[in-house]
Image: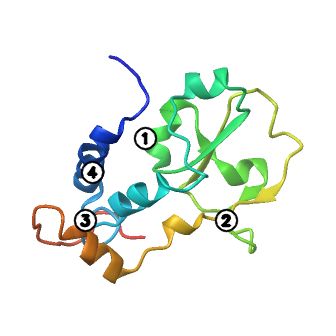
């Protein structure tokens, strides 16, 4: 396997893969492919492997994902470190953290706010989906 920086010519293939992977998982259809598309133009998006992140001196990584999947990569629930996704300090089982420098998050506390590209409307998704092959929306397998 070769790990490399994503290249512009691969953007569409990545978005199709993300669309296929998330289709009907959390809600009918999906919006994750549009979020990926918008994140590329936002300064918060870092597209690196964990080993590359470590080499760059990044001390911790936060993602949103399925703990059952990402736990095998060393991620755990971010609220375990006292870092929450909202002001109400409500644990979100999909907001995950991984220390790349052991102990880095020990004395850290904070609130994560999703970057603007995460906030998409149904209309935004419908418009963007016109650039993809048509697909029937179904019943989510894991509704939120």
Tags 1 and 4 in contact by the CB under 8 Å rule?
no
Q: Position of residue 24 (x, y in %)?
A: 25, 65
- In this view, the mark in front (1 or 2): 2
Q: Position of residue 122 (x, y in %)?
A: 34, 81
Tell me the distance, in whole angstroms, between the alpha carbons under discs 3 and 1: 18 Å
Tell me the distance, in whole angstroms, between the alpha carbons under discs 1 and 4: 13 Å
Does dot 1 land on a helix, a strand or a loop? helix
Residue at image mark 3: 24
**Who's the residue at 30% across and 57% down the image?**
22
**Who's the residue at 34% across and 77% down the image?**
124
Above or below, 115 against 44 in this view is below
Does dot 2 land on a helix, a strand or a loop? loop
The label number, if any, that marks residue 69 in the structure image: 1
Tell me the distance, in whole angstroms, between the alpha carbons under discs 3 and 2: 25 Å
**Quadrant of the rendered image containing residue 143:** bottom left
Tags 3 and 2 in contact by the CB under 8 Å rule?
no
Residue at image mark 2: 113
**3 or 1: tag closer to the N-terminus:** 3
| Image side of residue 107 versus residue 36, left or right | right
Above or below, 114 against 1 in this view is below
Quarter of the picture holding the C terminus:
bottom left
The label number, if any, that marks residue 21 in the structure image: 4
Does dot 4 land on a helix, a strand or a loop? helix
Would you call the spot at circle 4 few (<14 residues within 10 Å), some (14-19), or many (20 or more)?
Answer: few
In this rendered view, identify the residue nearer to me: 76 or 135.
Answer: 135
């Amino acid at each position: 396997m070769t790990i490399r920086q994503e290249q512009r010519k691969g953007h569409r293939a990545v978005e199709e893969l993300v669309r296929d992977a998330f289709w009907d998982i959390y809600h009918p259809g999906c919006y994750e492919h549009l979020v990926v598309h918008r994140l590329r133009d936002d300064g918060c998006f870092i597209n690196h492997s964990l080993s590359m992140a470590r080499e760059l001196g990044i001390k911790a990584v936060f993602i949103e994902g399925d703990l059952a999947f990402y736990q095998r990569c060393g991620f755990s629930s971010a609220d375990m470190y006292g870092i929450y996704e909202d002001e109400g300090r409500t644990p979100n089982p999909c907001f995950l953290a991984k220390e790349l420098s052991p102990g880095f998050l020990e004395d850290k506390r904070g609130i994560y706010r999703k970057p603007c590209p995460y906030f998409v409307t149904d209309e935004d998704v419908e418009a963007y989906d016109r650039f993809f092959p048509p697909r029937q929306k179904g019943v989510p397998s894991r509704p939120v």
